[in-house]
Amino acid sequence: MTDHNATIADVLELIAFNQIALRAGIEELAKWVLERGSKDIHTNVLTALQILDTNAEGIANAIDLLRR
């Protein structure tokens, strides 16, 4: 692995960690909203979180590729 690829992989990993943290916080807020009766908003948030999950998988694959 080149230094360039290592740097890119490191940055992508930090972005992935941030994404995981944001997802956790947003999920907690979605639960709070659901407890207060806003089922539609909760559903919309969960749909958006699924996109984060899909993108997280792509980022993980790119990190793996760069680290080879």
Image: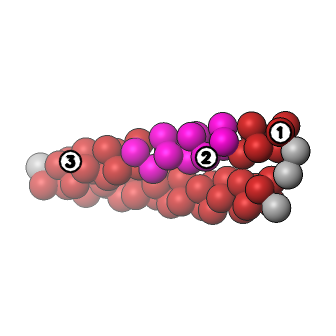
The residue that appears at 22% across and 54% down in the rendered structure is 31
Mostly what secondary structure, the magenta segment? Answer: helix
Amino acid tagged 3: Val
Element marked by disc 3:
helix
Instruction: Please indicate whether residue 50 sits to the left or right of residue 21 in the image.
Output: right
- The type of colouring in the image is secondary structure
Residue range in magenta is: 10-21
Amino acid tagged 1: Asp
Residue sitting nearer the eye, 7 or 26: 7
Q: Nearer the viewer, mark 3 or mark 2?
A: 2
Amino acid tagged 2: Glu
Element marked by disc 2:
helix
Disc 3 marks which residue? 33
Which quarter of the rendering shows the C terminus? bottom right
Disc 1 marks which residue? 3
Disc 2 marks which residue? 13
The disc at residue 64 is none
